[in-house]
Image (cartoon, rainbow, N blue to C red):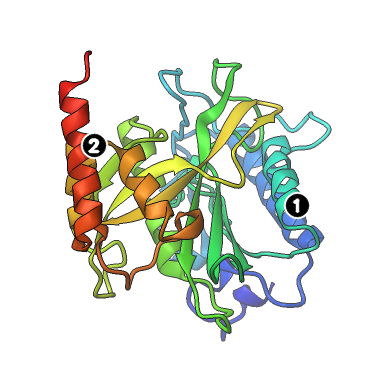
Amino acid sequence: MPYAGEAAEPNADMWATADETREEIVGLYRRAAAHADATIEALALDDVGRVPWWGDESVTLPAAHRGARGAAPVPACFDLSMTSDAPGWEAIDARLDVLYPDVEPKHYGTLHRFALGGPDPLDGISFYPRDSPVSHWHIVSYGMSELYAKESDNPEESGWGFEFTFRVTRDIEDTDPPMWAANMLQNLARYVYSSGNWFESGHHMDANGPIWQDYETAVTALAFVEDPELGTIPTPHGQMQFLQVVGLTGDEYEAVQQWTTEGVLGLLAERAPLLVTDLDRPSLTDDAAVRAVIEAGRAHDDISPA
């Protein structure tokens, strides 16, 4: 494990090295899961122990729970008696393999599961480099749906019923994924798990500042829509939608509030294929013709019968 060496970079356990195979990475996940389950089975929640690389701090097993919409909390232990111990994960991979045959994404995962007290709700995030219709990263989360065992009492949906996707522009020769985008998706996931409020197509939110805090951009809000290429799929644990996050400027966010998310995103899609987020683009509302369409749509909705 190269990340365990004394010379390892900080957070080196968050990415795979070039010579690690998918089988090795998944095998490590499974060994970590089995070790965690054995620990939980053997110890009480208030037993005190130590994690060697955390220093002298004493820790106890967290009373970790995960819940779906209105579902009762469930144990952190996963049922590993199934043919696959990650059928939800494999359902996501199968859909991506259709869209990206023979493409190996850059994948980043966490070894300290959120269900066991880790800070990041998403167990993994994959980055697919795209050259068309515009050069961009297609980013997909693993962790909002039920990746392992069926935990909720809703047979129709897997977990929260969706996984995040996000498309952001990239330079054609850029091979380094935008980790700020991964942090943004983790923050959105953290909000859902902590508040119990989930996202659906048509929802929108104000980010209260640039969606990438270290970059000067007018994109300060988000909208949510079904991913135009990945759609919605069945999984062994219920239906799951790929829910795309789309960056909006402040003016566009005001237009969404006055009109509809679908209307504004429809106008954006005419200028941004696949609704790829471009942090450097101007606002749609800088165009007088677009402002007129938004105003006409708002006025039409105002006089339409309920």
Residue farthest right in this picture: 83
Q: Nearer the viewer, residue 292 or 157?
A: 292
Label 2: state its secondary structure. Answer: helix
Look at mark 2 in the image and give the residue it sits on: 297
Residue 62 is tagged as: none
Check if mark 2's residue and mark 1's residue have beta carbons within 8 Å.
no
Residue 133 showing in the rendered view = yes
Q: Name the front one of labels 2 and 1.
A: 2
| Residue 50, percent from left and from top | 49, 55
Reply above or below: 259 against 21.
Answer: above
Pointer 2: residues within 10 angstroms few (<14), some, or many (20+)? some
Label 1: state its secondary structure. Answer: helix
Q: Amino acid at mark 1?
A: Asp
Q: Nearer the viewer, residue 2 or 203?
A: 203
| Residue 161, percent from left and from top | 52, 30
Look at mark 1 in the image and give the residue it sits on: 97
* CA distance for labels 2 and 1: 39 Å
Identify the residue at image location x=46%, y=35%.
64
Quadrant location of the N terminus? bottom right
In the picture, residue 209 is in which quadrant?
bottom left
Identify the residue at image location x=46%, y=50%.
118
How many numbered discs sit on the rendered protein?
2
Reply above or below: 208 against 145.
Answer: below
Q: Amino acid at mark 2?
A: Gly
Residue 58 showing in the rendered view = no
From the viewer's perspective, tell me whether residue 231 is left or right of residue 194: right
Reply above or below: 151 against 135.
Answer: above
Q: Earlier in the sequence, mark 2 or mark 1?
A: 1
Identify the residue at image location x=40%, y=60%.
271
